[in-house]
């Protein structure tokens, strides 16, 4: 009988909750998240506004709900960009060996040397602050971690007997990569995607906080935090709600990543 | 062997990188180290918009004269606190009976910071250079000058093509700045003037450092060194004062957080008025804005009181046109376009603009970001669609909106004094072409004082009735500073922040 994977379950529940909240926000939110209502600005939490309102009189709960869309969207696209570039690079680096492999991995190291936020701020400065710029920048910054992890997995697969047999039988590299290598590193991709997702959520929040991410008035948890700074002494709840939302989302994706790693890592087989 | 070589190369590369990092860290640290908290003779001021260049002869924007005018550069005449024109580099002046010839008696002991004496020849050079060397739109104010000549080293005669009420006033602004003929080669990075302070260092993205000009011809200022530190984030600006990094917040951008300072004996809070009309500008060259009904609809769709409460904590003043209360021709014109969403909707239906999408291109300035969100929400309730784009300020906004006029609407504070005619002209970024308005302005400029006031009132009312833009509110002059600092301006009605009067009690 397998042991219960608590991280996987907790992570799954949290992430599932966020996804559900984002989906619900497409069809229902308590109020229009961008509707400015000066008459009810800075309202305390009440039955009418569960999380209160901000300085524009916008409902904070509605903003948190719509903001989850931004968070998930950025995460999906950033991880997608990272996977689409990083996975083929990792597989290629494992299969070609010698100097092309060295070239790929050193270029990878070079990119790894740039802190993700710095790279994203550079992108924002050059191409202008937008959700798209943030997504692409975070995605590119996550490429090295994907390439490195996938390369190590692919190197192990390349040493297996069925791959050696396929090569001996004269199979071309592309069919080997598609048929033998990629299916065997899928679990690694899943785990890495989950971990990168958490990083992307945090990076988007940080970028929006710094003014390089999602521009107003599109709700974003990071920008909600930024806008709440003026009110830290008078209405600290404005910082608490988006802050807690970011913390829970990052925790959820990290737990999911840990859970998936435990689930897929053969070295942890005896712990199950 | 190969491994050793590889390692050696890696080590050298790493060392080089570390050295580079160390160098850059050192330079940036040295740049910002002039906080006044440690030395009585040093002062640090926090500001919001950093200049794109130090050359206001070729670069627009209020940030350059704010830092340099009156401090590094001086003018022949200047405004006092009440807005009256008083002597500066000119000790006195006379005007001919036909109001066309101005004769200035200049001070004889002023020197530029390149050690050249200031003479009437420099004044002639500076006036002529506005016409020939300047590229900003403000240079048009000097078009009325027919001739400028030096009668002696200390006497200057300027002849106008026609009488002009505005010219002498304009000479108190940046176009009246006096330059040395040998000091204009590197204006963008090394300004040379006769002022109480001389330019020392510009750490881009961080601060401008000015040193006291010990050879100054007038009263020597109190502070030996003044650092102007720039902050993009209003909370960071507030925090900088709380932590002692700066001594003055020259313009509070987060008024909701003002309670941190009021009631705290360490700080003084000054509240006055400014020339800064926060304008929702329309690109009047776009077909959608050619119909007056669309423009009026936008004005009536905005609840200005609610907007002021929301985006500037209710501080500031509603004005309804391009004239601040400190100008002699001020009238409260807020009743011209009262808040009426139903009327706005019907006007939009009538003009055919209902449902149109307008791009609101905002500079990354705190008040613009806040007000933009309110404007978007309120215009959308009236039936327009508004797409907000944020443009980095100053470079991207100046290039896209101001120079290339690639926008539908924008929000910015126009802080230049008496700028009604300059802002609403066919060549300015508002592209507002109204011959009737130009007629009123020309009559105001040519007539006597009473005629000027009457015609300026007419012009301001016409602007408001024609809805050439929407005046969201007038920025307040909100300053927070160390309690023992004196000489801070109650009102900000000039282009510059006068540093020479600052002192510690």
Image (cartoon, coloured by chain):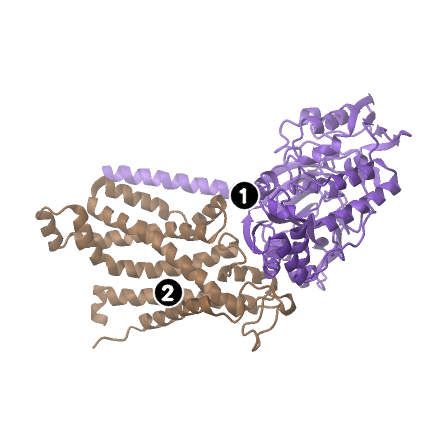
Q: Residue A20: x, y in percent?
A: 40, 70
Q: Nearer the viewer, residue B304 or B45?
A: B304
Look at the image and give the colour of chain A: brown
Residue B109, above or below A248: above
Q: Residue furthest right?
A: B97
Q: Is residue B501 visible?
A: yes
Q: Nearer the viewer, residue B282 or B363?
A: B282
Q: Residue at 29% across / 61% down in the picture?
A: A190
> Which is in the foreground here, disc 2 or disc 1?
2
Q: Nearer the viewer, residue B477 or A130?
A: A130
The residue marked by circle 2 belongs to what chain? A
Q: Residue B364: x, y in percent?
A: 58, 50
Look at the image and give the colour of chain B: purple
Quickly name the residue at label 2. A253
The residue marked by circle 1 belongs to what chain? B
Could you classify mark 2 by the number of other residues whose Cα lies within 10 Å: few (under 14), some (14-19), or many (20 or more)?
Answer: many
Disc marking residue B97: none
């Amino acid at each position: 009988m397998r042991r219960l994977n608590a991280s996987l379950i907790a992570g799954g529940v949290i992430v599932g909750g966020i996804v559900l909240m984002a989906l619900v926000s497409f069809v229902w939110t308590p109020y229009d998240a961008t509707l400015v209502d000066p008459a009810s600005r800075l309202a305390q939490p009440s039955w009418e506004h569960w999380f209160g309102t901000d300085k524009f009189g916008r409902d904070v709960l509605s903003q948190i709900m719509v903001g989850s869309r931004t968070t998930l969207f950025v995460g999906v696209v950033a991880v997608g960009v990272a996977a689409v570039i990083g996975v083929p690079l990792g597989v290629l680096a494992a299969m070609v060996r010698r100097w092309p492999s060295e070239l790929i991995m050193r270029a990878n190291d070079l990119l790894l040397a740039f802190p993700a936020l710095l790279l994203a701020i550079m992108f924002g400065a050059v191409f202008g602050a937008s959700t798209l710029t943030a997504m692409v920048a975070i995605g590119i910054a996550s490429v090295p971690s994907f390439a490195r992890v996938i390369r190590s997995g692919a190197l192990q697969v390349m040493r297996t007997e069925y791959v050696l047999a396929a090569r001996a039988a004269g199979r071309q590299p592309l069919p080997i990569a598609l048929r033998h290598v990629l299916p065997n590193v899928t679990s690694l991709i899943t785990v890495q995607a989950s971990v990168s997702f958490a990083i992307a959520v945090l990076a988007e929040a940080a970028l929006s906080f710094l003014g390089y991410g999602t521009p107003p008035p599109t709700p974003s948890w990071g920008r909600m935090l930024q806008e709440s700074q003026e009110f830290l002494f008078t209405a600290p709840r404005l910082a608490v709600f988006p802050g807690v939302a970011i913390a829970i989302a990052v925790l959820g994706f990290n737990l999911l990543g840990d859970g998936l790693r435990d689930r897929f890592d053969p070295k942890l087989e005896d712990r199950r | 062997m190969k491994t050793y070589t590889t390692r050696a190369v890696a080590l050298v590369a790493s060392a080089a990188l570390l050295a580079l990092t160390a160098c850059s860290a050192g330079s940036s640290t040295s740049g910002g180290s002039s906080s006044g908290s440690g030395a009585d003779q040093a002062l640090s001021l926090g500001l919001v918009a950093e200049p794109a260049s130090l050359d206001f002869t070729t670069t627009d924007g209020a940030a350059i004269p704010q830092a340099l005018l009156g401090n590094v550069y001086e003018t022949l005449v200047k405004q006092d606190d009440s807005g009256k024109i008083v002597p500066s580099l000119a000790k006195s002046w006379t005007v001919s009976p036909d109001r066309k010839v101005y004769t200035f008696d200049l001070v004889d002991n002023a020197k530029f910071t390149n050690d050249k004496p200031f003479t009437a020849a420099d004044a002639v050079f500076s006036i002529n250079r506005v016409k020939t060397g300047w590229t900003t739109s403000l240079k048009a104010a000097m078009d009325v000058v027919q001739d400028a000549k030096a009668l002696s080293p200390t006497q200057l005669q300027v002849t106008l093509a026609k009488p002009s009420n505005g010219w002498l006033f304009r000479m108190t602004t940046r176009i009246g700045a006096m330059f040395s003929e040998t000091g204009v080669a590197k204006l963008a990075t090394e300004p040379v003037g006769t002022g109480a302070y001389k330019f020392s260092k510009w750490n881009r993205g961080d601060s401008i450092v000015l040193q006291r000009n010990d050879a100054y011809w007038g009263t020597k200022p109190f502070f030996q060194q003044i650092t102007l530190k720039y902050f993009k984030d209003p909370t960071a600006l507030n925090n900088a004062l709380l932590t002692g990094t700066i001594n003055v917040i020259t313009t509070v951008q987060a008024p909701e957080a003002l309670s941190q300072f009021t009631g705290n004996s360490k700080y003084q809070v000054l509240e006055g008025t400014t020339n800064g009309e926060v304008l929702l500008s329309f690109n009047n060259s776009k077909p959608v804005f050619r119909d007056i009904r669309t423009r009026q609809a936008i004005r009536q769709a905005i609840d200005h009181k609610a907007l002021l409460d929301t985006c500037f904590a209710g501080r500031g003043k509603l004005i309804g046109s391009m004239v601040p209360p400190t100008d002699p021709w001020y009238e409260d014109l807020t009743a011209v376009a009262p808040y009426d969403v139903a009327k706005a909707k019907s006007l939009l239906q009538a003009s055919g603009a209902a449902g149109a999408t307008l791009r609101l291109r905002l500079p990354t300035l705190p008040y613009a970001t806040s007000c933009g969100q309110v404007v978007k929400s309120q215009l959308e309730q009236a039936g327009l669609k508004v797409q907000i784009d944020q443009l980095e300020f100053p470079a991207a906004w100046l290039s896209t909106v101001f120079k290339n006029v690639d926008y539908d609407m924008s929000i910015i504070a126009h802080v230049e004094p008496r700028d009604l005619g300059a802002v609403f002209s066919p060549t300015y970024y508002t592209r507002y072409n109204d011959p009737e308005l130009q007629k009123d302005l020309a009559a105001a400029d040519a007539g006597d004082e009473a005629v000027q006031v009457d015609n300026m009132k007419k012009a301001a009312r016409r602007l408001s009735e024609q809805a050439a833009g929407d005046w969201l509110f007038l920025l307040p002059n909100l300053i927070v500073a160390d309690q023992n600092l004196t000489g801070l301006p109650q009102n900000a009605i000039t282009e510059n922040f006068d540093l020479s009067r600052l002192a510690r009690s």
